[in-house]
Image (cartoon, rainbow, N blue to C red):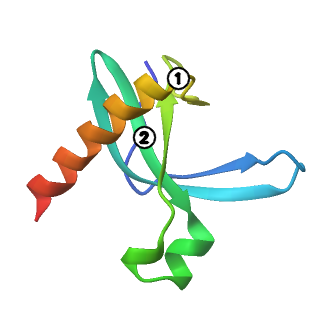
Amino acid sequence: MGKIDVGEVFTISDENDQELEIEVLATVKVEGTEYAAVSFVEDIQQESDDDIDIFFLKVDKEGDLSAIESDEEFEKVSAAFDEVMEDED
């Protein structure tokens, strides 16, 4: 089974086929599925923590990242990450 580690950097292509580097900031399991909170490497290097855009991706069994399909799923994942982040303070 694929495993994604915090700090790992992936290259994704956006809709214009521009390659973007994203870094994994945290991972969380929700109802048996693993999700990764990621942000653009460029943003992480340039911005303070407050200004980083964080988005969530689903991790499949091969360890590949894919988009979250539904708002409902997104809400669950977002809430789970909020809990994880609060625990670390």
Mark 1 falls on what kind of element?
loop
The spot of residue 38 in percent (x, y) is: 48, 52
Q: Which residue is mark 2?
A: 36
Of residues 29 and 1, the one drawn nearer to the viewer in this rendering: 29
Disc 1: CA contacts within 10 A as few (<14), some (14-19) or many (>=20): few
Of residues 52 and 22, the one drawn nearer to the viewer in this rendering: 52
Disc 2: CA contacts within 10 A as few (<14), some (14-19) or many (>=20): many
Q: Which residue is mark 1?
A: 70
- The kind of residue tagged 1 is Ser
- The kind of residue tagged 2 is Ala
Q: Quadrant of the C terminus?
A: bottom left
Residue 6 in the image: above or below residue 71: below
Q: Earlier in the sequence, mark 1 or mark 2?
A: 2
Of residues 80 and 65, the one drawn nearer to the viewer in this rendering: 80
Residue 2 in the image: above or below residue 42: above
Alpha carbon of mark 1 to alpha carbon of mark 2: how far?
Answer: 16 Å
